[in-house]
Amino acid sequence: MEEKITEAELEVMEVLWDAGEPLTLGQIKEALWEKNGDTTKTLLRRLCAKGAVGQEKRQVYWYTPLVSREEVRGSRTKKLIDRLYAGSARNMVAALVRADQLNQEDIAQLRQLLDEMDGERRQ
């Protein structure tokens, strides 16, 4: 489901994630000042239909994300790797290194992460 979230819908999700609490349509529209109210309402309706956002009726509707930022990132990253790198994360990282997109600090942090993961697997 997370990979079906469009870029425009993702903007709404970011507002909800950043808020950390339920928001009204008005609060979401205010945060997305470049979108008009009808567009925001349509995006919320779609996100509710996809199961990514829940709504609760009080005096007005309050919206809450039902999927985490990490779930969506993970799903979108996997889809990207599958589509562009034939499912190989190694090929993606190699492309980043070759394109000079990772600095020495990034590489050191990746090494540390891989070492930690390797240590966990051996336990």
Image (spheres, rainbow, N blue to C red):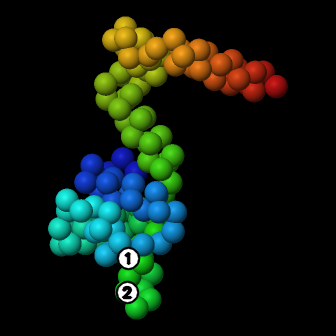
Residue marked by disc 2? 60
SS assignment at label 1 = strand
Residue at 37%, 36% (x, y): give it. 79
Q: Position of residue 43 (x, y in %)?
A: 26, 65
Q: Is residue 87 left or right of residue 45?
A: right
Q: Is residue 120 left or right of residue 59?
A: right
Residue marked by disc 1? 24
Residue 58, visible in the rendered structure: yes
Q: Is residue 89 left or right of residue 12?
A: right
Q: Is residue 37 left or right of residue 103?
A: left
Q: Position of residue 69 (x, y in %)?
A: 47, 50
Residue 49, visible in the rendered structure: no
- Three-letter code for the amino acid on which mark 2 is drawn: Val
Query: Which quarter of the picture shows residue 41?
Result: bottom left
Residue at 20%, 72% (x, y): give it. 37
Residue at 46%, 69% (x, y): give it. 64
Label 1, label 2: how far apart the Cα atoms are:
7 Å
Query: Which quarter of the picture shows residue 94?
Result: top left
Q: Position of residue 59 (x, y in %)?
A: 40, 91
